[in-house]
Amino acid sequence: MNALLLKDSKAKCQIEVGEAEPRTVISGLVKYIPIEDMIDIDVVLVCNLKPVNMRGIKSHAMVLAVNDGTSIELVTPPAGSKPGDRVYFEDYQDGKPLAQLNPKKKIFETIQPGLKTNEDKIALWTDDENKPHLMRTEAGVCTVNSIINASIR
């Protein structure tokens, strides 16, 4: 991720996602994470949301981060992951991702309350039956540095 600080503590990031051109992403994370800590790092993105205008710039993805109410950390892919690797939840790896989620169906908003970290600092989604599904790539599970049992947004 290469970030450029904009007004109002928003960062304009150019993020390599394995496509011909990097995606432009606007993030409010620089209020919580120093800009120098957001340069040349690996992050987990939601890329199939409808692009939205933020500060007059279209944002083409959302950076996932965990928040425990006092601090925020980025969700990171496992070592060996490459830009563009598919992120999925265990038991759902065979599904084909939608090119773009229909914002009227509120798919992301429906699953987001179940996104969290566990006591092992692993990112996961808990389904309606309270069964955890680890967030992963082919290289392994997605994690955070230290925040446990907290919400991912």
Image (cartoon, grey):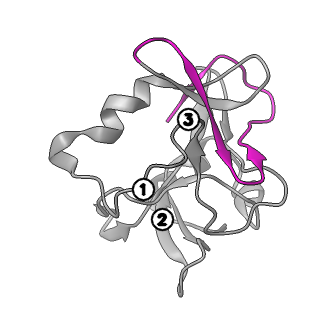
Where, by quadrant of the figure, is residue 16 drawn? bottom right
Q: Residues within 10 Å of mark 2 (few under 14, many from 20)?
A: many
Mark 1 and mark 2 lie on one chain; the one further toward the N terminus is 2
In the rendered structure, does residue 146 fall within the stretch colored magenta?
A: yes
Q: How many marks?
A: 3
| Labels 3 & 2 near each other (Cβ < 8 A) | no
Q: Position of residue 62 (x, y in %)?
A: 47, 53
Task: Please name the amino acid that badge 1 sits on.
Answer: Lys
Question: Is 28 situated above or below 125?
Answer: below
Which residue in the protein does label 1 denote? 96
| Of labels 1 and 2, the one closer to you | 1
Task: Please name the amino acid that badge 2 sits on.
Answer: Val
**Which residue occupies the foreground of this view, 31 or 142?**
142
Q: Position of residue 100 (x, y in %)?
A: 31, 60
Q: Secondary structure at mark 2?
A: strand
| Labels 3 & 1 near each other (Cβ < 8 A) | no
Q: What type of secondary structure mainly makes up the magenta span?
A: loop
Mark 3 and mark 1 lie on one chain; the one further toward the N terminus is 3
**Residue at point 35% right, 40% down?**
108
Question: Is 3 situated above or below 91?
Answer: below
Q: Residues within 10 Å of mark 1 (few under 14, many from 20)?
A: few
Which residue in the protein does label 2 denote? 25
Residue lying at the far left in this picture: please name it.
Answer: 104
Question: Is 22 situated above or below 42?
Answer: below
Work out which quarter of the rendered image holds the N terminus and state it. Answer: bottom right
Q: Position of residue 79 (x, y in %)?
A: 84, 54
Q: Is residue 112 left or right of residue 29?
A: left
**Residue at point 61% right, 52% down?**
44
Q: Is residue 72 left or right of residue 25?
A: right
Q: Which residues fall within the magenta stretch?
A: 128-153
Which residue in the protein does label 3 denote? 91
